[in-house]
Amino acid sequence: MWKYACDEFGSAENVASRLQLFANPLNIVAPEQTKYALIDESQISEPGPVDIKGRGVMDLIHVDSCFGALQTSRAF
């Protein structure tokens, strides 16, 4: 019998697993409600409503880029 140190089950994990199907590698897909928290710091596109198994139709966003996220320091 296997005992896991950390089990992750539930609604949030199921939705995250389903959203993975709509994301390109190294990109982020999130429910539309997330848009307002990210809109000042990210470039966002809206693919529109998508049918998510077990949840119904959800409006999704793609986070295309984050402004200033990759700032590097040239100080030596």
Image (spheres, rainbow, N blue to C red):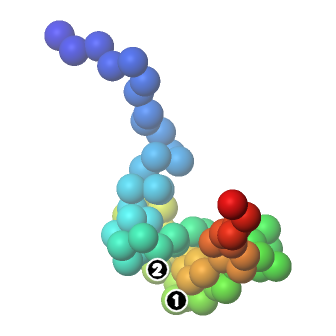
Q: Residues within 10 Å of mark 1 (few under 14, many from 20)?
A: few
Image x and y of residue 64, in percent: 56, 83
Q: Quadrant of the C terminus?
A: bottom right
Q: Residue at x 33, y 19 (%)?
A: 4
Image position of 18 (left or right of 12): left
Is residue 60 in view from this perspective? Answer: yes
Question: In this rendering, does residue 34 appear at all?
Answer: no
In the rendering, which numbered label is found on residue 13?
Answer: none
Is 42 placed left or right of 1 in the picture?
right
Which residue carries the number 1 mark?
Answer: 47
The answer to whether 32 appears left or right of 27 in the picture is: right
Query: SS at mark 2?
Result: strand
- Residue located 17% across and 10% down the image: 1
Q: Residue at x 71, y 79 (%)?
A: 67
View extreme (left): residue: 1
10 Å crowding of disc 2: few (<14), some (14-19), many (20+): few
Looking at the picture, tell me which residue is in the foreground, 10 or 55: 10
Q: Mark 2 against mark 1, which lies toward the viewer?
A: 1
Q: Amino acid at mark 1?
A: Pro
Q: Which residue is mark 2?
A: 50
Residue at (46%, 46%) from the top-left corner?
Answer: 13
Q: Is residue 36 above or below residue 64?
A: above
